[in-house]
Image (cartoon, helix red, strand yellow):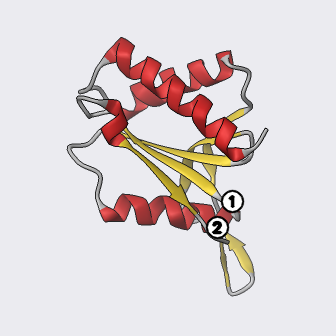
Amino acid sequence: MNENVISNIIIGCAIEVHKQLGPGLLESTYETCLIYELRQKGLQILQQKALPIIYKGRKLDAGYRIDILAEQKVIVEVKSIDMLADIHVAQILTYLRLKELKLGLLINFNSVLLKNGIRRVVNNL
């Protein structure tokens, strides 16, 4: 399954979660429900996956965690904030580079219309 197919499934599941819960809850609530939906669709999901950095040739655990890693191909960062900022895009782009992956989704559930809270982030490797 390629990244675009996976991302379409993720977006569909995120819309379902948002439809059921609406905006205004904690990130962890949305993350838990989104993971439930993704697993119901048969996707392999890793939650809060540790993301070490490589510094001077050494792998170091710097405390970074990927909210959701779908099918070992797509990173999903879940937010529940007033507005996405450039730093959030930079964060997921850094995660993509560290994992050497191409596609990430930044999903802000604190949006009246979820489609306005979704950003696709592409790493051009």
CA gap, disc 1 to disc 2?
8 Å
Circles 1 and 2, Cβ within 8 Å, touching? The answer is no
Depth check, front residue: 87 or 15: 15
For this view, does 44 lie left or right of residue 97?
right
Circle 1 residues within 10 Å: few <14, some 14–19, many ≥20: some
| Image position of 76 with respect to 17: above or below | below
Depth check, front residue: 104 or 59: 104
Can you give x and y, in whole percent of width and height, for residue 60 in the image? Answer: 66, 70
Mark 2 residue type: Leu
Label 1: state its secondary structure: loop
Residue in the image at 28% along x and 30% along y: 113
Question: How many numbered marks appear?
Answer: 2
In the rendering, which numbered label is found on residue 83? none
Which one is closest to the eye, mark 1 or mark 2? 1
Circle 2 residues within 10 Å: few <14, some 14–19, many ≥20: few
Mark 1 residue type: Leu
Depth check, front residue: 89 or 3: 3
Residue in the image at 74% along x and 46% along y: 72
User: Quadrant location of the C terminus?
Assistant: bottom right
Q: Which residue lies under the disc numbered 2?
A: 98
Q: Which residue lies under the disc numbered 1?
A: 101
Q: Is residue 75 visible?
A: yes
Residue in the image at 74% along x and 31% along y: 44
